[in-house]
Amino acid sequence: MSDNPSVTPMMQQYLDMKEHYKDCILFFRLGDFYEMFNEDAVKASKELEIALTGRDCGLGERAPMCGVPYHAADTYISKLIEKGYKVAICEQTEDPAMAKGIVKREVIKIVTPGTVTDNSVLDEKKNNYIACISRTGSYYGFAAADVLTGEFLATSVTYGSAEERLLNEIAKYMPSEIVIPYGMADTGLTGMIKSRIGSYISYMDDNAFESEKASNTLKEFFGPQVESFEPDLALYAISAAGALITYISAAQKTTLGHFSAVKGYKIEDYMVLDQTARRNLELTETLRDRRRKGSLLGVADRSVTSMGGRLIRKWIEEPLLDIEAINSRLDSVAELKEKYMLRMEIREILRKIYDMERLSGRISLGSAQCRDLISLRISAGQLPFLKELLRGCSSGMLFDIYNSFDALEDIYELINSAINDDPPLSLKDGGIIKEGYSEEADRLRAAGTEGKNWIAAMETAEKDRTGIRNLKVGFNKVFGYYIEVTRSHLDLVPENYIRKQTLANCERYITDELKKIEDTVLHAEEKLAALEYELFLEVRQKIADAAVRIKNSAFMVAVTDAVASLAELADREDYRRPDVNDGSLIKIIEGRHPVVEKNIGYGSFVPNDTLLDNDENRFLIITGPNMAGKSTYMRQTALIVIMAQMGSFVPAAEAVIGVADRIFTRVGASDDLSSGQSTFMVEMSEVASIINNATPKSLLILDEIGRGTSTFDGLSIAWAVTEFISSRDKIGCRTLFATHYHELTELEGKLSGVKNYCITVEEKDDGIVFLRKIIRGGADESYGIQVAKLAGIPSPVTERAHEILKILEDADVSKRFSRIRRGAKNVDGQVDIFAFMNTVNSGSEVLEELKNIDIRNITPVDALNILYSLQKKAKKGI
Amino acid sequence: MSKIILLDENTANKIAAGEVVERPASIVKELLENSLDAGASVIDIEIKGGGIEYIRVTDNGSGIAQDDAEAAFERHSTSKIRCAEDLETVMTMGFRGEALASIAAVSDIELVTRQRGFDGGYRINIRGGSTVFAGAAGSSEGTSVTVRELFYNTPARYKFLKKDAYEAGAVVEAVISAALSSVSVSFRLRNNGAQVLFTPGNGDLRSTLYSLFGKEAATLSDDISHVYEGIEIGGIAGRPEIARSTRRNQYIFVNGRPIRNKTVTAAIDEAYRTILMTKKYAFIVLKLEISPSFVDVNVHPAKAEVRFSENGKIFEAVYAAIVKAVNKAQDIRAAGRTGDAEDSENPALKYNGSAGAVAEDILTQPGFTIYSGLSAAGNDAGSTEKACFGSLDHNTSAVDGAIEAGAKRPRISEMRVIGQLFATFILLEYVETAYMIDQHAAHERLLYEKLRKEYASDAMSSQMLLEPVTYDPPVKDSGFIDEKLDILNKAGFAAEHFGNNSYIIRSVPSAIAGEDPDNAFRDAVDALRGVFRDPDNNGYAENSQTGEMGTEIAAGTDLLLYGMACKAAIKGNRLLHPDEILHLLKDLDDYDGPLTCPHGRPLIMKADKKTFEKLFKRIL
């Protein structure tokens, strides 16, 4: 916009500034308000539901304008952030009273979804991540940071189907904002991020991502430590990390003292769980309504501090692979589980500790208030007690914490000596600094008090001097201090009294001396307020310098809380310690589903065993009716493995867990309509992904493959997939496969490693009862119609269904031959469905038996018995 | 024509039910006993509607075989004894074979069970005595019994049930009892969906106490461990600091069974007599292990009472066990206490076999109980204050030695003044009784009443200061002070706003004219906020309440006036001139109100002549 001479200076200033912040809503400080103009005003007025007015700006028609009061700004800013806007905050940087011409203004902060620091919009048990992606050729760099806690991580994706893997890694963090170079703006990847993750996307100039520049930025910021990246990873991760730091610094416009390091990691350091698996297993959110309650996190999180809560969440999302690390966690959990009273005491103390991580962040960013410092002091005050409690602990993690615990006594002392225990909300009105901390402040305070004392003493002095017995010295806001004399004594008023105010029954005077003292007092009070503010900033800065120490102690507290939380969980819910090792055996005795068992009342959940390895038991086919518990069984196996690898006790009487490097799930039929894929397509792409990425150490949960298409197609695909996955040459990893294709039960004995299981059901005259027990063997019925009846389908429909079923079964080849198959001997070589056609009419067990009866040598009674048994068999169709 | 007929099984059960199945708590008790006998390590209990509507007890024990499950509901069936002789050696808890049958007759009961090592479970549902369902069912190992609609078919018994809250309370007590007895079992209790109890079941009694009663019970107590002639006694004895005002927290177990027994109770009382204030009862968990042949458990239908074949031995054993436990603790405390030479001696274990024998220590005499109680109970003045502050039963802390107002008592003017004892107490005599008055408490109470009258009739006298004084409160308090200026003025402080965050004080209440004006003002403001700074205590008693409760505002003003009275009154440890003593006594004589300081401490105590004579062994 060119300089238009008739535009007012203020508006010009606004327009100039807006040029630089086109992608934000600009909050322009005018007096006690933040004002927005033009399009910003129109947008904001709509989103925030505030009045849209106008203002003369010298252009003829009024410019649209709307504003919010300065002290309530945070709520409005948060609302805009939630709606996906960025807000640039422009403050007056000089005192309006001193300014010549228009007041100088500057943007001091840009608030974006990933960089909010206002507590009211943040979930305290969840980190708020801002991420960044860089691309070099077909490889990607990825960095993520939490502006408030100072966490900063980076990794790269350098092989395989990089985009898919990158998306899964992003999904792990679910960042609220992602920074992408302009060059990637229109790629498919960006589109997928928008649809699958839903983060707010910010763009940045490509040159911030340039590796040399990014590397320098990091070096400047962190020092030489950046060399600690491994050579390969280094390049791509550095790009993303450097760009991210640049972006955050620009937005916050402060130093980021609490960012102490960038932690490089490999995605394969943790169990790989793609987005589908995380969702299907409902690790941190339920599938249906994306809520915490009903997920594993909802059940497992018993933490009492925010930091502990966030850490538990992270532990669930990043199950470990390193046996030692896992056992180290388990050792500590075991110790606190056993020591009941110690655990209770620890939790009592933890309850009194505030969110030190975020407090240190706010202090570093310069936005901490007095209350925040007091919260920090109270928290620090508890640390010595916590340390003392940890003294007797023998398990590695807790022992190490005790030895390296920094109880921040000096921070406590600093705040305790400097800041009043119950400070006011505002920073500029004094009342912040304790007596005894600063000589100057004490002096000014005393001066104020002395002055007031002098004035009070004046009352007695004047009484004596003038002889006016009822003379009084008073104060009011308008006139300040005065001497009050009633009408009856006006004659005694001395010369030096200057009349100030007349009232009905008295007159009020001042004297020069009084005024002078009053000025001193007021002056002292003003100076004191300003000094207290300075001192506060000083104290805050000193604490900010120790931000890294505070963060470290906060981390120790978080770990203690997380361990105590897992111990509490294990104690309350009767979990046992799993034996985690590098082998391939997964053996679970009396396993239970941690979430489902809480929903149905203690003792009602029927526990089940699981036996999986890379050998004879690597592919388990589970058949049986729907709703009977197959899915729950498979999910519980996966959850128990995840819990074991996160270092938690598990809901089972006994568990041996051979570590899994990834868990895949293909569960449930969902039409992913938004991305234009049908159920079957979705399923096939998931299976494809599995086949392409699974390793022998993976764990697969497959719930119905081959649905969503015709029976024969589906059966064929399911069959082929089974062969492929179970084959040790191809994948051979541990797999649980639930299916309604009973034909697949034939594969036990044909393919190595395949075992059949089914879920037990008892059939009664009026329906079926789910016994919910998993046993060896294939189910021969799917009881689909009975289940339909249980679900409420009316009798006429189900009865007719039975009739139709009978007809179909008689005609159905596969059903018939499976009955025959059970009687026939094993056939060597390839399993061939059609070969069995030839055996349909011969080999029937009943006929065989009949043929073998020796009629001459049986009694009539025997004959009847044999007849009875033959009839029974015939009815069953053998 | 026979008029007498044989009742059918069902009816007979209903009748028997009346004895065994009084209320939900008795059902829970029976079911818990079964679970424990089945070797459970976790027992989960859930009740709704006080247990009348719904009770579920689930355990992870050994489960019941199908045939046994059915037979269990027949009367007098039990797996626990075979014949009457077995009663002699019965170690299991539930044995009379009545429980399940009785319960089934008067409710809708469902049993789901699965034996350890078996795949399948079994479910049986009986309503009012007839089987509704019996068949296979899914279940985890162990047994779960659900009782619904108790007494649905016996309206007479139903009417006898109390309100839900009461019944629920009884269930809670039953579970607490079981949990204390079996500390290796984890008990969980939910009432109307909310978790009420959880014990860790880690085999440690202290942890169980912690989970049920909190940190104090677990830490302010001592282990009991004693053997006496084949009787083993264990448990935990609470220290006087955590004594209660009722017997509710005395848990007695014999061979794991919770019981009531007069002999044991008497032994407990005797053992604690010297260290507890009267009307206070020890917090104690006492477990006796004794050969079954010396205990008759078949006395009470609900097995709540037992008979010992040798009461005397029991008494001695319990008494000795407790005294031993408590004394160990006393030694430790005595070492840390300042001043009191007599207390540091062990009350000697001179028990010689008959209840009520006197030990040779001044501390054990009833008349002086209150003092030794106070000093033994606390390590510092602070905790003695606690015993009085805000205690619900402060009215009963006027111990039996104290005089209740209104009770027939002689007028002080009729008593003979002996003198002043320890510069703190005034000694008087009347006929065959000695009276002791706490000079500070008495004066404080008199002043307090006077100030209240004056305040109420707006006649508080105030004294003008020689020079007005300024007071700068903490910034955030100014608002509060402005609100309360009226009250402060009425109380005798002539104060008004004097600049930013400053006040000028021209007069203070006469009663505290000797105090530092701005401290007095500050204390007054604090008192209005409910914070009382006790000069004897050096600390705060936050939000302390005076003995007389009113609305919140009244409490603030009362506290203010109380603070003034306390400051202005004659202190302890101050020698009084005879005139002062007489003056005080005269005022006290005219006084008609409660004979306690506003905090509930007694003003006057008495000890009769016999007490003194016993002390000197003139009589026994």
Image: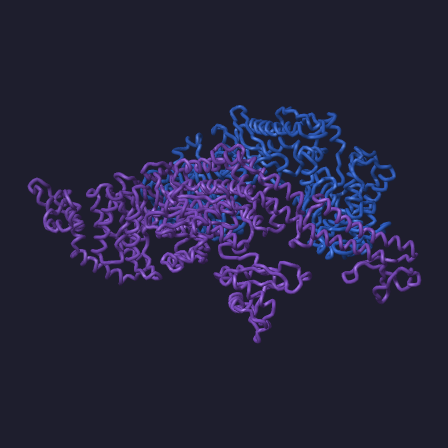
On screen, residue B594 above or below B357: below
Outermost residue to the bottom: A60
Q: Nearer the viewer, residue A776 or B257?
A: A776
Q: Quadrant of the C terminus of chain B?
A: top right
> Taking A455 as reference, is A792 left or right?
left
Q: How many marks?
A: 0
Per the rendering, the colour in which chain B appears is blue
Q: Nearer the viewer, residue B343 or A244?
A: A244
Q: How is the image coloured?
A: by chain
**Which of the 4 image quarters holds residue B360?**
top right
Query: Do we see residue A453 in this rendering?
Result: yes
- Image spot of residue B297 (x, y percent): 49, 34
On screen, residue A616 above or below A366: above
- Image spot of residue A436 (x, y percent): 71, 43
Outermost residue to the left: A856
- Image spot of residue A219 (x, y percent): 49, 45
Question: Which chain is tinted purple?
Answer: A
On screen, residue B503 above or below B83: below
Q: Nearer the viewer, residue A509 or A180?
A: A180
Query: Do we see residue B555 in this rendering?
Result: no
The residue at 21%/58% (across/down) is A805
On screen, residue A580 above or below A768: above
